[in-house]
Amino acid sequence: MIDSPVQHTGILTIGTPGKSLTECTREISEWVGGTGITEGLLTLFIRHTSASLLIQENAAPEVQDDLIAYFDQLAPEGSHYAHDSEGPDDMPAHLKSALTQTHLAIPVIDGRLALGAWQGIYLFEHRRRPHQREIALHLAGE
Amino acid sequence: MIDSPVQHTGILTIGTPGKSLTECTREISEWVGGTGITEGLLTLFIRHTSASLLIQENAAPEVQDDLIAYFDQLAPEGSHYAHDSEGPDDMPAHLKSALTQTHLAIPVIDGRLALGAWQGIYLFEHRRRPHQREIALHLAGE
Amino acid sequence: MIDSPVQHTGILTIGTPGKSLTECTREISEWVGGTGITEGLLTLFIRHTSASLLIQENAAPEVQDDLIAYFDQLAPEGSHYAHDSEGPDDMPAHLKSALTQTHLAIPVIDGRLALGAWQGIYLFEHRRRPHQREIALHLAGE
């Protein structure tokens, strides 16, 4: 039991090269480390609806290729969407965003994020072109 | 860094007209505003398994039509489900709920929800008939 | 409004019999009860990428059978994945994990989890063989 938690907030901006999984575990761990909090809860919230967040395996790079190919097949580009004014990759991007996560929460225990041995934090860019993406951060703890 | 966060809880009841995306950004923002908290973390939890929560674009209404049509096609009604005692739209509703979100968390920064410019908070009703849906609210901050 | 929340963290280990939905509502409720916190926010985070978390109906067992069959059909085993070095059920497990939840948050209100009448907390095991799975727990409140 820990008395009187404190909290920190921030915005992290990540550049993406277009459709991809960009790992940002290190940037986020460094931000957490900088707060001095060793026990608490980290929350990440992506401020977009055509990119999302994902915890995935960070050991085998083929996993990331398979994830991107899978979601392309599950929510394909095509002429059957009512919303097409922002390009053929926009509505599939919203669908992929709905199927994955706009936010993540990860406990901080014993001074580090409670990620498993093979887990990494990814920004999942669904648009074809490069984008600057903002992630709002919140950390409460002690 | 902010000392000694406080917390608030509540229940928000939203009526839905049957299968639809009902935006509730305003109701939720007003509840947050009423607490006086300007820095913290809001959590929403829907107390049902045949309706869910979603952050999506609130600019183009066609996006919402496409989302509803997409999930209808991804989890269609049919005679192939073992669970059919509550009607043909019940098991597809559970599947859509599993594919989207039962809870959302959104940081509150500088006195407002850290939503992006085009993001809205939606209750995604998956049943055909109108329902009253309960969302449990939790806000911790200062 | 409640002053000066405190927090608790822990790790819960759950054994699974291979591909299944294992309800762990009771274990988690007991852990919450043991902290003495009656108003707050519980967060669960599974430390794996081939198993996930799900809130689902716990009344009709057929719902669980349909969920397992549905995700098997949505992310089938096959020879079309680049990542196949850990067995044919590994990449489908990562996809099912991406489509469901690595973490859940549930408010605690009036001394109990704010779950709806028919909601249970499930560990969704996606691998064929039995596994020991770790869930990191965080509870802040009063």
Image (tube, coloured by chain):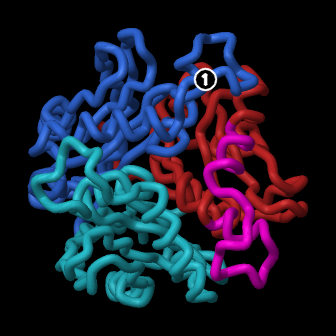
Chain colours: A cyan, B blue, C red
Under circle 1, the secondary element is: loop
Give the left or right position of residue A11, taking residue A92 as reference: left
| Rendering quarter of residue B94 | top right
Q: Position of residue A41 (x, y in %)?
A: 45, 64
Residue type (three-letter) at the residue carrying disc 1: Gly
Q: Residue at x 25, y 67 (%)?
A: A136
Tag count: 1
Q: Position of residue A78 (x, y in %)?
A: 31, 55
Residue situated in front as seen by the camera: B44 or B48: B48
Q: Residue at x 80, y 47 (%)?
A: C20
Q: Which residue is mark 1?
A: B78
| Range of magenta residues | C67-94
- From this view, report whether residue C76 is shown above or below residue A11: above
Q: Residue at x 35, y 15 (%)?
A: B18
- From this view, report whether residue A27 is shown above or below residue C129: below
Q: Is residue A47 one of those drawn in magenta?
A: no
Give the left or right position of residue C88, taking residue B137 as reference: right
Q: Residue at x 43, y 25 (%)?
A: B126
Q: Position of residue C97 (x, y in %)?
A: 60, 60
Q: Is residue C71 one of those drawn in magenta?
A: yes
Mark 1, other Cα within 10 Å: few <14 / some 14–19 / many ≥20: few
Observer able to see residue B49: no
The subunit letter for the residue under badge 1 reads B
Give the left or right position of residue C70, taking residue C17 as reference: left
- From this view, report whether residue B65 is shown above or below residue A103: above
Residue situated in front as seen by the camera: A97 or C106: A97
| Rendering quarter of residue A7 | bottom left
Observer able to see residue B2: yes
The N terminus of chain C: image quadrant: top left
Q: Position of residue C25 (x, y in %)?
A: 70, 38
